Image (cartoon, grey):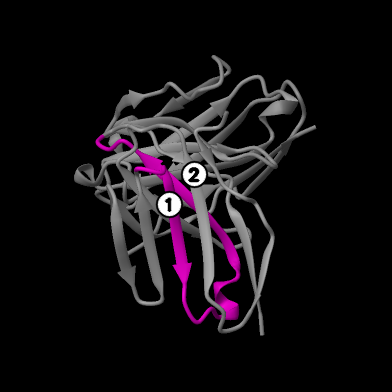
Amino acid sequence: QKEVEQDPGPLSVPEGAIVSLNCTYSNSAFQYFMWYRQYSRKGPELLMYTYSSGNKEDGRFTAQVDKSSKYISLFIRDSQPSDSATYLCAMTSGGYQKVTFGIGTKLQVIP
Amino acid sequence: EAGVTQFPSHSVIEKGQTVTLRCDPISGHDNLYWYRRVMGKEIKFLLHFVKESKQDESGMPNNRFLAERTGGTYSTLKVQPAELEDSGVYFCASSPLEAGGIEQYFGPGTRLTVT
């Protein structure tokens, strides 16, 4: 079983839709949960991270962590064509511990 | 401020040859990480430098891979001899000392093709 499970998609939505991206994980030691965005032929770019359970909002993006269910989500409101990219969840127990990535979900926002 | 840079962007080599990948982290970033993404798989951790010291090299596949970070600045990852299964995209990332693995800045990657 993989430590982090993420549906690779692709996920296609119309412009303006609310997008929900999700990951589940099995390692209860994970404390920090990150979301990266990766455009084609580019490196991943950190969008936001959350420590432990709870919500965090940054503009049109909201990250949620439910440690009791080992489930994390990223919501994108008012999605734009420029949001079309692969979204990777990543997590670590913190400090100098290694980061474990999900496979990434490919999102396409249709104008 | 310049981001993380990697060279070359793409390398095509034959099985048995040697390839050296280079990463220049963001200036002042003491943490430097190497990752690899094989087609259809997740990005996988290879190793982590803090300054010039290897903090964690548990992800290195085997002894054909050698990473160095002389002087705590740029890093090189050498694959010798290369095998077909080494093909993939190799990413480098860096972060400030206090950020650890949480706020990493990634380079664009080196796409390695072994034929």
Q: How far, Cα to Cα, is label 1 from label 2?
A: 6 Å
Mark 1 belongs to which subunit? Answer: A
Quarter in which the N terminus of chain A is drawn:
top right
Query: Is residue A71 positioned above or below B47 on the image?
Result: below
Q: Magenta stretch containing residue A84, yes or no?
A: yes
Q: Is residue A85 left or right of residue A54?
A: right
- Tell me, for residue A24, which label it has, or none: 2
In the image, A45 versus A22, the foreground residue is A22
Identity, as a three-letter code, of the amino acid under mark 1: Ile
In the image, B40 versus B63, the foreground residue is B40
Considering the numbered disc 2 on the image, is that residue within a helix, a strand or a loop? strand
Query: Is residue B3 positioned above or below B65 on the image?
Result: below
Find residue B106 and report its horizontal and vertical position in percent: 44, 51
Question: As drawn, which residue projects farthest toward the right?
Answer: B115
Identity, as a three-letter code, of the amino acid under mark 2: Thr
Q: Residue at x 31, y 26 (%)?
A: B55
Q: Residue at x 45, y 62 (%)?
A: A74
Count neighbours of disc 1 (C-alpha within 10 A) and say few if under 14, some if 14 to 19, many if 20 or more.
Answer: many
Find residue A83 and report its horizontal and vertical position in percent: 55, 73
Q: Is residue A96 left or right of residue B111?
A: left
Q: How many marks?
A: 2
Q: Residue at x 58, y 40 (%)?
A: B42
Query: Is residue A48 positioned above or below A5 on the image?
Result: below
Considering the numbered disc 1 on the image, is that residue within a helix, a strand or a loop? strand
Q: Which residues are magenta?
A: A68-95
For marks 1 and 2, the one nearer the N-term is: 2
In the image, A29 versus B100, the foreground residue is A29
In the image, B111 versus A1, the foreground residue is A1
- Tell me, for residue A72, which label it has, or none: 1
Mark 2 belongs to which subunit? Answer: A
Query: Marks 1 and 2: CB-CB under 8 Å?
Result: yes
